[in-house]
Amino acid sequence: MSDKKHTLAWFELPVSDITRAKAFYSTILGVELASMDLGDGFKMEVFPGESGNVSGALVWHAEGWYAPSNTHGPLIYFDADPDLQLALDKVEEAGGSVFIPKRQISEDHGYMAVIEDTEGNRVALWSKS
């Protein structure tokens, strides 16, 4: 048996306007993202995370290596505890839209909602209550 804490190590969420996307996620999740310019037309805005915890970044590439999508690709769940409704209430004002409003997954697994961000990505929010 593995002693790994998580099976997900990192995610990269494609964006077409990295400044707009950073403002959107900072607003709805109440977090600061760290800017990284990796050269060759490749930029990231990294979500906060401590060593050993899952994190990821918004990514933009001048050559179109990444493409936002609201219908294809993985569905990433952002932790919006203690109540995802607090984040959901900020989505439209921040430039996104709500696909699936808050709904209970189960008593054991909490709640979820699916939104579209300012870049056209389909992403989910999760909370225990």
Image (cartoon, helix red, strand yellow):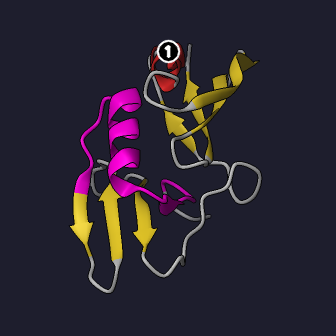
Residue bounds of the magenta highlight = 5-34
**Horizontal side of residue 71 vs 39, given as left or right:** right
Query: On screen, 79 above or below 85?
Result: below
Q: Residue placed at 57% from the left, 65% from the top?
A: 2
- Closest to the observer: 75 or 104? 75
Which of the 4 image quadrants contains residue 55?
bottom left
Q: Check residue 19 for magenta coloring.
A: yes
x and y, in percent, of residue 95 in the image: 48, 31
Amino acid identity at mark 1: Asp
**Residue that appears at 43% across and 64% down:** 59
Residue 126 occupies quadrant: top right
Horizontal side of residue 71 vs 81, given as left or right: right
Question: Does 86 appear in magenta?
Answer: no
| Pointer 1 residue | 89
- Of 102 and 110, the residue lying toward us: 102
Q: Is residue 98 visible?
A: yes
Q: Is residue 128 above or below residue 5?
A: above
